[in-house]
């Protein structure tokens, strides 16, 4: 019986494993090794790791984990999770291995869907990004585009004005802004283009211009886009784990879900930045240790 199984090897999962392993729990981290941020060239706004490549971040994190004899790492995918006793779970991997554990930390992240623009994948992570806090500094003072197909559009537009005064917003044929919001954009000298985007032009992942349905071509040196994030963990309903209206797992500050023995951290609980996900993983690991210590302490 393993004390803790962490599902997901990103910043939340690695941080949770580190804290639980240092708390003298036997921890197994299982990861499919398909990180969402693999397309990006560098990770930013993580103190002491600013500018590090995502693969280097994961490599350094795993080296930290494997210093501890209490922590092991396995590549794999979980195919089923069954609650076997009041205080334990049985997990089955795609290789048909059966793993029994007292606690599970869910840190699988989310599925990301980009705007429906042909060829956007070529530029995403190189010159088109989704998070101004992560990549705004690198794109500052450039002529930028925000490709926005969702209700997040105005919020992200406001943020981007902090990094550039040369900004256009393209909704790719969608009606995203109401009349009042359009007036706000106009007041702030931001052009709104509601035509469909026909083509993104550039070289080597670096955006140079955008071609619209009318034939107009506008030069841009990069941009941002709104994305749709979805929790794609398949066992939530089966296990009875509560989610919010957006479909993300609900937890308290220590990562507890409504199911005893199941914790969650990182973007599976809602969109967050790298350092926030790591912090949430830390708290989930600490939550397991605190609960274990409470249960073991005598005389209370």
Image (cartoon, helix red, strand yellow):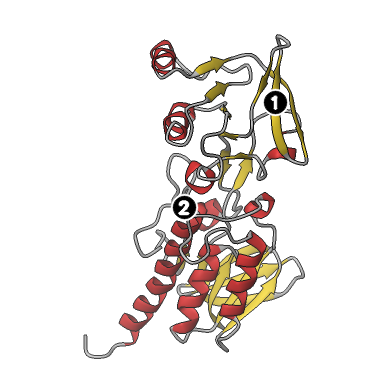
Residue drawn at (46%, 59%), measured in percent from left and top? 275
221 left or right of 4 in image: right
The answer to whether residue 103 is visible is: no
Camera-side residue: 135 or 174? 135
User: Where residue 146 sits: x, y (%)?
Assistant: 56, 29
Residue drawn at (39%, 63%), measured in percent from left and top? 256
Spot the residue most to the front: 141
Residue drawn at (51%, 52%), measured in percent from left and top? 267
Spot the residue most to the left: 300
Against 198, is 113 above or below?
Answer: below
Find numbered disc 1 in the image and state the secondary structure of the residue it sits on. Answer: strand
Mark 1 neighbour density, 10 Å: few (under 14) some (14–19) many (20 or more) = some
Q: What label does residue 118 carry, if any?
A: none
Mark 1 — residue?
A: 209
Q: Are marks 1 and 2 in contact (CB under 8 Å)?
A: no
Find numbered disc 2 in the image and state the secondary structure of the residue it sits on. Answer: helix
User: Where residue 113 sits: x, y (%)?
Assistant: 64, 38
The answer to whether residue 125 is visible is: yes
Against 243, is 289 above or below?
Answer: below
Camera-side residue: 89 or 5? 5
Camera-side residue: 136 or 13? 136
User: Where residue 227 sits: x, y (%)?
Assistant: 58, 37
Camera-side residue: 223 or 111? 223
Mark 2 — residue?
A: 269
User: Where residue 154 sits: x, y (%)?
Assistant: 44, 26
Q: How many marks?
A: 2
Question: From mark 1 to mark 2, how far is it between C-alphas?
Answer: 36 Å
Foreground: disc 1 or disc 2? 1
Mark 2 neighbour density, 10 Å: few (under 14) some (14–19) many (20 or more) = many
């Amino acid at each position: 019986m393993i004390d803790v199984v962490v599902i997901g090897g990103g910043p939340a999962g690695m941080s949770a494993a580190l804290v639980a392993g240092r708390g003298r729990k036997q921890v197994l981290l299982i990861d499919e090794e398909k990180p969402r941020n693999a397309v990006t060239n560098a990770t930013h706004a993580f103190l002491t790791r600013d500018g590090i490549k995502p693969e280097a971040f994961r490599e350094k994190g795993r080296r930290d984990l494997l210093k501890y004899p209490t922590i092991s790492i396995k590549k794999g995918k979980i195919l089923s999770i069954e609650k076997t006793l009041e205080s334990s779970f049985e997990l089955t991997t795609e290789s048909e291995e059966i793993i029994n554990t007292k606690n599970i930390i869910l840190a699988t992240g989310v599925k990301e869907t980009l705007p429906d623009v042909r060829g956007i994948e070529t530029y995403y992570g190189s010159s088109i990004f989704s998070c101004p806090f992560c990549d705004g500094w690198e794109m500052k003072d450039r002529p930028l585009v925000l490709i926005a197909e969702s209700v997040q559009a105005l919020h992200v537009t406001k943020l981007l004005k902090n990094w550039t005064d040369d900004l256009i917003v393209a909704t790719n044929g969608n009606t995203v802004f109401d009349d009042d919001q359009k007036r706000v954009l106009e007041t702030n000298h931001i052009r709104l283009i509601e035509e469909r985007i026909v083509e993104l032009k550039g070289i080597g992942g670096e955006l140079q211009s955008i071609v619209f349905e009318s034939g107009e071509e506008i030069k841009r040196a990069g941009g941002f886009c709104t994305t749709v994030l979805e929790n794609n963990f398949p066992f939530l309903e089966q296990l009875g784990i509560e989610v919010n209206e957006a479909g993300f797992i609900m937890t308290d500050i220590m990562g507890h879900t409504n199911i005893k023995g199941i914790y969650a951290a990182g973007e599976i609980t809602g969109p967050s930045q790298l350092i926030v996900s790591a912090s949430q993983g830390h708290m989930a690991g600490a939550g397991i240790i605190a609960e274990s210590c409470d249960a073991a302490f005598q005389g209370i």
